[in-house]
Image (cartoon, rainbow, N blue to C red):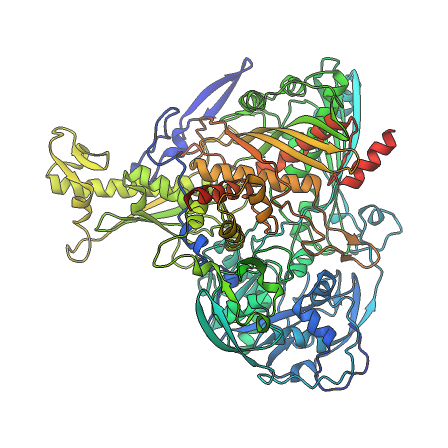
Amino acid sequence: MSSNDEKEKPRISRRAFLRTMGIGAAASTAVATGVLQAPLAESAVPPKVEGLDYVPVELKVNGRRYALNIEPRQSLADVLRTGLELTGTKIGCNQGECGACTVIIDGSAMYSCLLLAVNVQGKNIETIEGLSRGGRLHPLQSAFIEKDAYQCGWCTPGQIMASKALLDKNKNPTFAEVKTAVSGNICRCAAYNHIFEAVLAAAKKL
Amino acid sequence: MAATKQIIIEGKTFTVEDESAALQGQNGLMLEPWGKNETLKHVGKRIPKKVAWDKVTGQAKFAYDIQVSGMLHARVLRSPHASAKIVDIDISVAERLPGVRAILTYKNAGKQRWDRQRAVFKDYVRLVGDEVAAVVADTELIAGDALQLIKVKYEALPHVIDLEEALRPDAPKVQPYGNIWEGKPSIYERGDIQKGLSEADVVIEHTYTNSEQHHACLEMHGCVANWANDQLTVWDSTQGVHLARDLLALTLNLPISNVRVINRHTGGGFGSKNGIKQYHVIAAMLSRETGRPVRLFLNRSEVFMVTTHRPRTRQKIKAGFKSDGTLTAIDYEEYGRGGAWNEGNMRWASRAGDSIKELYKCPNVRSTNYAVHTNLSSPGACRGPGNTETLFALEQFFDEAAVHFNMDPIELRLKNFAEIHPLTSQPYFSNGLKESYQKGSNAFGWKRQKPESVKDGTKRRGIGMGTVHWHGTSGEPSQALVTVYPEGTVEVNAGIADIGVGAPVIFAQIAAEELQVPFDKVRVAYGDSAGTPYTINSSYGSRTTSLAGPAVRMAAADAKQQLIQIAAEVLKVSPADVQLKDGVFITKSDPAKQASFKEVTGQMGWRKRRHLVIGKGKRLDNPKGRKVDIFGAHFIEVEVDTATGSVRVLRAVLAHDSGRPINALTYESQVQGGFLMGLGMALFEERIIDAETGVQVNADFHGYCCPTALDVPDQVTVIPIETHDLSTNINAKGVGEPPTAGAGGAIANALYNAIGVRIRDYPITPSKVLQALKAAG
């Protein structure tokens, strides 16, 4: 952190904006430590005023439409969790590396921490909360329970959504296809072998 | 004086305390441990966890998910320097950013201490990531914006990062007394090391190193704190609600009863979420300052840099053997990279060596351990702390010795098998090591194979094995409650946090077994320091089951005894004449006279004007004079590509003696998961620190490689070795950490068997494999 003479008005540069979003590994390091932090650019960006930047968005989540006001820089994961209080979508890194925030968008598994919520309007967003209704579980959810395919459970919604994206397209996957489908989802408790078993067991029931 | 008995091992007689000492409960209650071949209805079965539904539906609320009305969000500004004085700090711009509620720095934060040595905010920093300021704002993004607007003027000071550099006489001194923690090594010695080495026919010496493994829990570290009217409530991602509560009270100078820590689900801990860290105190300070609940969670790179990790170590093993492979001496020396602060966590840097002293029979042993200060965050307990680092070295060393003697590696280990615990000279309660070797090798199809004998193009395959060793608990105070409701349902009340391994399901199984009720009639209350008994301070040491399980069983037995009193009234006989059998209260003298469980429980409650039955249970010390150790053996096959240097573990057979597995399903998950974390440490994982700046350059999941679905073997076979352990009333010893400790040696040995070259520096990355192959020609 340098102590150069900046203008006294609070300013957020584009660079600072990117850092705050945690895009890329180096940038996130900077957020944590102040390392690599350049002096704030004296750009033409106006002072940030609370609420002023908020924009209306409409999101289609689990078949329901939600209208809300968000900051344009908010990720989909952030909006799902804090705006819609759908905290089943987890955040494990907030920079597109761990897969805990995996949701299904128009049929494909995506990291919701890497998407800006303003950019996914009009798309079909599926989260873990959309899988069960009235206490009835999706076969994947039942299989994850039965096979003990998790321990701490933080990665579990992401694992299940990644697996669902696979099974939605491929009802009869091979062992290798299952492994590949969840390969973007870190399970630190390493329940991988039970996850493979659960996905294959669920496929049989679909 | 408790009853004693005599055990004879290798002609020696040991007088030990009888098992009955540990099994005596309150009010004259006696609990026999379950019999060796006793078939149980719930215990030992494959039963999914109690929290399963919450976790697969996304309904489970972790601390990270907690949103409290009025909640503000905090972020911490951290030092970019490895050592510096803070000349000035200017928050005047940042505090004017709309949405910012408060900023704390050393200038305005008062004298709140972190520990005896230092305040939470100081005018100097000792490592990259030390706390410089904290901002609380309406949103996390605004708090992040404000961090950019704080101006800090540092005066950089010399620092040292590298372990070897820190040991040089001219290295910058991290602490006034120098860079060796407390100025001296910790030394253990038994027998006569020089005599032992001189009696040897062969002396073998090798040095092994390991990098820093990070816990990398997927739920990041943090909490939500609400400090209102001298009552502090904290929703915390923790391994133990009671320890976190105790330490918060101590640090903030509050009565213990004024602090409440809540956590129902923890997204991974692995040793890194025991007790409290600075962020707990900062969140509490900011809450007091603003009068609002404050959420403070670290981001991923902060987690990597300022929470703890397994220490980097350099371990030298020098051992003397007779020509038949019998050990005569082990001289062991370890240097562990520690952090900048003189704090309790430094002990983890010099914690390795237990298995040197305790695993194999050896009369002459010396262990010299140095914890070395550097300008980094302190290490901490990381799954199998000490033993994992030791066994990664020792089990490769034993393989090297077996090659020297041209012996089967199992044979060399059996040659040095310890019938009695070498450190304490006590017999074991149970020891399944020999059975682990036998059943594991059978299941694997173990047959010695010459190095470099299995080739296919550039691919080489090899097999390897290693021993697993860990400590069981000697018994700490543990309490639990069991409440029985009029409808016949049962509630276990236990002061634990569920870190994911399934303690609640295990408690429910134990209570269902003892009270002979269907499993689904039992629920478990836990995860809140208010209203739960002190069941465990924190879940570490692989001991939640073996500490709390016996207390739960005792509480259920106490409840059963009270129910028998009520049943006697219902049946109009004396309590001594009543027994609970197959879930029904039966009169012993007239078995036709029976009362159902619900008939008896229905006598309680406000309608019947009778108190509910609340069974109280406690865990007693283990019977004295014997040792509880946990054993196992890992068998591995790897494939190495000599063109790329990549190593793949093809299959693993893991035989584990943990006493009686209470839940066969969660037991399997724990052994597989623990092994795979060890696989990560053996092949991929390391914190890479830039020595020039003290910055971790891979503080993210792209650079720090945890095993993924594509890195794990298709087959990870778990073989429970069920020893009949009598240290507690539930026969269980523990399983969480040992599978990690056993992984590295077996993998490295299989790699040697594949390519005929040793790599003694973990993680064994492709570049190290290629370099080693090149050096070997």
Q: Quadrant of the N terminus of chain B?
A: top left
Q: Can residue B3 be seen in this view?
A: yes
Q: In which quarter of the image is residue B141?
A: bottom right
Q: Where is residue A114 in the image (x, y as percent from the top left)?
A: 62, 64
Residue A52, horizontal then vertical, whole percent: 59, 85
> Is B399 drawn above or below residue B323 in the view shown?
below
Q: Is B698 located above or below residue B390 in the figure?
A: below
Locate the C terminus of chain B and report the quarter of the image it occupies: top right
Q: Which of B668 and B723 is in front in this view?
A: B668
Residue B752, position as x, y percentages in the image = 74, 28
Name the image quarter holding residue B724: top left
* Residue found 10% across the figure and 39% down from its top: B572
Labels in figure, total: 0
Residue B698 location (% of width, % of height): 73, 54
Q: Which residue is drawn at 60% across and 59% down?
A: B277
Q: Is residue B443 left or right of residue B683?
A: left
Residue at x 45% of width, y 53% of height? B55
Is residue A190 at all visible to an observer of this figure? no
In screen coordinates, is B172 left or right of B752?
right
Is residue B482 positioned above or below B744 on the image?
below
Which is nearer the eye, B178 or B147?
Answer: B147
| Left or right: B415 as drawn, with respect to B500 | right
